[in-house]
């Protein structure tokens, strides 16, 4: 990841890759975070999101239904928000 960029958009960075490649990509993303890059990560892999993200926004029916710190959410809670059954759909920190 080039040092000239301040913002990085990443979509499904590890889809279809083997474990070694996944770990390599995750390390590059974590290094970009350490380098103070702004990163928008879009992924179908909830474990990946929980591992890499500081803040998670959940979208359901085309609307953002929750924005929370990653340490405040579990996979189950994210699933509830995705199904639009979370308790506070408009919680936006």
Image: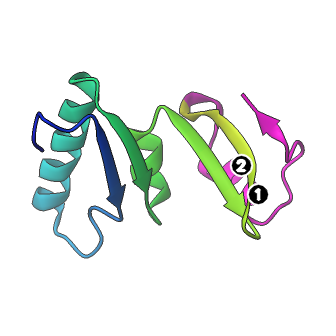
Quadrant assignment, res 52: top left
Question: Residue at (81%, 36%) from the top-left corner?
Answer: 91
Residue 46 shown left or right of residue 15 in the figure: right
Badge 1 density bin: few <14, some 14–19, many ≥20, Cα 10 Å:
some
Which one is nearer the viewer's eye here, 9 or 27? 9
Residue at disc 2, secondary structure: helix
- Please tell me the numbered disc located at residue 77: 2
Instruction: Please tell me the numbered disc located at residue 41.
Output: none
Instruction: Give the residues drawn in magenta, as a range.
Output: 71-93
Q: Is residue 72 above or below residue 62?
A: above
**Residue placed furthest toward the right:** 87
How busy is the neighbourhood of tag 2: few (under 14 within 10 Å), some, or many (20 plus)? some
Q: What x and y, as percent, mark residue 77? A: 71, 48
User: Residue pushed farthest bottom?
Assistant: 16
Total numbered labels: 2
What residue is pinned by disc 1? 80
Instruction: Give residue 53's position: percent from left, percent from top.
Output: 44, 38
Secondary structure, mark 1, is helix
Q: Please state which of residues 4 and 59 is positioned toward the viewer in this rendering.
A: 4
Residue farthest along the front direction in this orientation: 4
| Left or right position of 50 against 48 | right
Compute the Cα span from label 1 to label 2: 5 Å
Q: Residue at x 85, y 43 (%)?
A: 90
1 and 2 marks in contact (CB < 8 Å): yes
The residue under the point 24% across, 23% down is: 34
- Residue drawn at point x = 45 percent, y = 49 percent: 49
Answer whether residue 80 is magenta in the image: yes
Q: Nearer the viewer, residue 65 or 85?
A: 65
Name the quadrant of the C terminus.
top right
């Amino acid at each position: 990841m080039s040092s000239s960029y301040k913002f990085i958009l990443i979509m499904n960075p590890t889809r279809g890759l083997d474990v070694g490649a996944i770990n390599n990509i995750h390390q590059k993303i974590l290094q970009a975070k350490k380098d103070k890059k702004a990163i928008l990560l879009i992924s179908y892999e909830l474990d990946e999101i929980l591992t890499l993200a500081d803040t998670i926004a959940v979208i359901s029916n085309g609307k953002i239904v929750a924005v929370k710190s990653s340490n405040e959410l579990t996979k189950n809670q994210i699933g509830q928000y995705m199904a639009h059954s979370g308790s506070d759909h408009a919680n936006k920190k």
